[in-house]
Amino acid sequence: MGLLHWEKRYSVGIEAVDHEHRELVELINRLHEQAKAQGSKVAVLGFFGDLYRAISAHFALEERFMREKGYDQLRPHKGDHERLLDEIRDIMEDYEVNDLFEERLLAQRLDAWFSRHFESHDARLHRALGHH
């Protein structure tokens, strides 16, 4: 069982974008499975590092795309990206310092963020750029 499940509400209705987001969800699940299989603190910290890098890379691509297209909502969209990355860093630091890793909590936070962000920011971005 994965940490996250692809949900219909994540869809922004553009196949290429949904495909990228689905791949991101699958990657998160794969990284999570690997960390769980090893079951060590090092593995979980590795999972967070990989998760952070994967999400950062996806965001960087999206932000480059927005800059190239002169998208007027770049700043709030990028701000939302940065909030999620901060959250992941916070969860990672909690774990490093206090050994607190609430798998359910991480899943809930990612799920809430993804559904909110994909539904609002990403949907608006792709509507504005004429991808219907």
Image (spheres, helix red, strand yellow):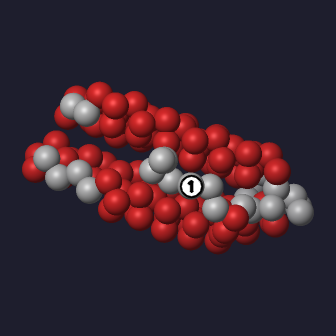
Viewer-proximal residue among 49 and 38: 38
**60 lies left or right of 83:** right
Whether residue 127 appears in this view of the structure is yes
Name the residue: 42% across, 36% down.
Answer: 33
Whether residue 83 appears in this view of the structure is no
> x%, y% of residue 124?
73, 68
> x%, y% of residue 14?
82, 56
Q: Relative to 120, does residue 86 appear above or below in the rendering?
A: above
**108 lies left or right of 123:** left
Which amino acid type is marked by label 1? His
> x%, y% of residue 12?
74, 62
Using the rendered view, name the quadrant where residue 132 is placed: bottom right
Residue carrying label 1: 5
**95 lies left or right of 36:** left
Mark 1: secondary structure: loop
Name the residue: 66% across, 47% down.
Answer: 22
Q: Relative to 116, does residue 6 appear above or below in the rendering?
A: above
Using the rendered view, name the quadrant where residue 72 is placed: bottom right
